[in-house]
Image (spheres, rainbow, N blue to C red):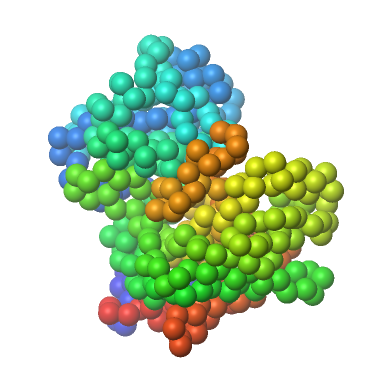
């Protein structure tokens, strides 16, 4: 792993690297090291890999998807996880199984999975009957995140697992190549630096000179962390890559900018923890109108269910699962938050397809049209700057160095 300089800090925590994460060097991806670290103990565990397709029955049979164009996430799952386990990984980890199954793509972040699943012989099975009760470790490598539904299922059936949606080669060679004991320790240091905050304010600087401010009330709650370790036998789901400190907001108000998938830019007005309207900055007015219509039809879709801060020194991968874990970024999320200990449940939405948990990531590569000029934390009489211009503050850098 990273060398430790004379100062006692790991090399990746030197200020030069913290402020310029592209300079960090990583070891090669090692499946046995990753799974052995994240899931200790692995001895005696039965493991499987889940992937998703629009046509799972046809594409999983005899690994037919390998002969088709596309499916980069599923092909990475096959090469680096399925083959890695079936080669020498199972024996090295003391595990059994290693089968691959396919379910139908949800086309939405954290939507509940249909129960139908197929094996590589083409047999139609049931997740509830054939998979969840029969595996100790389930690795879900899919197009969309399945963290929320699998968190609910692991508590019901008693398995551990990980969600690795959007898996690509940058993630394999950086966010999944790190030492997760270090990731966990760093996340805990930053969790302690943020926990029991009363509120967070985020200033967004727009290209036209305006500064929007979003205020999030946290009510002094204990901060939570996504740190990647699922040790012991307690049912749990890791989101990999990990490295995040997060809160479930109790209240929110103000404004923040939004970059939609088609590039349209809007300003979102927030009242009582909910996005109530979007106003066009630039782009397609129809995109703004569609969002406003969705908010009017199912107001729960605008509820803010998460505020998160990245804790890792990682390169941009182009996939939010890693990029939201980068130190100096933050994200808000709308929709269900039951998997985070929140009170927004799928049953509260008007339509099933609306019961997503959608992250809105603020990062230089993702939102180049606006800057996070400053993030501030208030905790009692204490006020600390956390982020300025997408860079971690001295307060956060000192927190990472504490106790070393």
Q: Is residue 355 above or below residue 401?
A: above
Does residue 171 sit above or below 83 in this rendering?
below
Q: Horizontally, is 62 left or right of 42 in the view?
A: right
Residue at x-position 43% and y-position 48% = 338
Q: Position of residue 357 (x, y in %)?
A: 53, 46
Tell me, yes or no, if residue 223 can be seen here.
Answer: yes
Residue 317 in sight here: no
Residue sitting at x 32%, y 80%: 402
The N terminus is located in which quarter? bottom left
Q: Nearer the viewer, residue 101 or 200?
A: 200
* Quarter of the picture holding the C terminus: bottom left
Direction from residue 74 to residue 31 in the image, left or right = left
Based on the displayed image, in which of its 4 quarters is residue 278 positioned?
Answer: bottom right
Q: Where's residue 243, x and y in %?
A: 41, 59
Residue in the image at 71% along x and 61% along y: 269
Horizontal and vertical percent for residue 264? 77, 51
Residue drawn at x 41%, y 18% is: 118
Asked if 69 appears above or below 249 in the picture, the reply is above
Q: Is residue 329 left or right of residue 132?
A: right
Q: Left or right: 183 with respect to 270?
A: left
Q: Is residue 163 above or below residue 366?
A: above
Q: Point out residue 245 in the picture as x, y percentages from the top left corner.
A: 42, 63
Marks counted in the figure total 0
């Amino acid at each position: 792993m990273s060398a430790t300089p004379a100062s006692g800090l790991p090399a990746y925590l030197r200020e030069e690297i913290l402020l310029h994460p592209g300079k960090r060097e990583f070891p090669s991806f090692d499946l046995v090291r990753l799974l052995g670290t994240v899931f200790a103990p692995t001895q005696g565990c039965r493991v499987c890999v889940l992937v998703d397709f629009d046509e799972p029955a046809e594409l999983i049979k005899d690994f037919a998807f390998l002969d088709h164009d596309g499916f980069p996430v599923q092909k990475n799952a096959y090469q680096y996880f399925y083959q890695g386990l079936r080669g020498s990984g199972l024996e090295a980890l003391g595990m059994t199984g290693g089968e691959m199954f396919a379910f139908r793509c949800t086309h939405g972040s954290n939507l509940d999975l249909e129960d139908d699943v197929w094996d590589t012989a083409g047999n139609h099975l049931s997740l509830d009957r054939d998979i969840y009760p029969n595996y100790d470790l389930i690795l879900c490598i899919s197009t969309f995140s399945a963290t929320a539904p699998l968190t609910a299922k692991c508590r019901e059936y008693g398995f551990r697992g990980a969600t690795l949606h959007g898996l690509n080669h940058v993630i394999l060679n950086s966010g999944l190549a790190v030492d997760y004991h270090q990731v966990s320790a760093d996340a805990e240091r930053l969790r302690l630096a943020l926990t029991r905050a009363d509120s967070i304010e985020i200033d967004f600087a727009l290209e036209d000179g305006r500064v929007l401010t979003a205020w999030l009330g946290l009510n002094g709650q204990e901060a939570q962390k996504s740190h990647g370790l699922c040790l012991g036998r307690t049912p749990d789901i890791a989101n990999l890559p990990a490295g995040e400190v997060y809160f479930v907001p109790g209240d929110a108000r103000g404004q923040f900018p939004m970059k939609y998938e088609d590039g349209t830019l809007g300003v979102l007005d927030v009242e009582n923890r909910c996005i109530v309207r979007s106003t066009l900055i630039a782009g397609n007015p129809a995109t703004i109108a569609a969002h406003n219509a969705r908010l009017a039809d199912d107001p729960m879709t605008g509820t803010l269910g998460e505020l998160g801060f990245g804790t890792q020194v990682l390169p941009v991968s182009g996939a939010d699962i890693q990029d939201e874990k980068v130190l100096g970024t933050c994200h808000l999320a709308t929709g269900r938050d039951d998997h985070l200990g929140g009170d927004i449940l799928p049953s509260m939405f008007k339509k099933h397809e609306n019961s997503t948990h959608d992250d809105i990531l603020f990062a230089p590569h993702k939102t180049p049209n606006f800057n996070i000029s400053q993030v501030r934390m208030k905790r009692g009489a204490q006020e600390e700057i956390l982020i300025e211009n997408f860079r971690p503050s001295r307060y956060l850098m000192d927190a990472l160095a504490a106790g070393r």
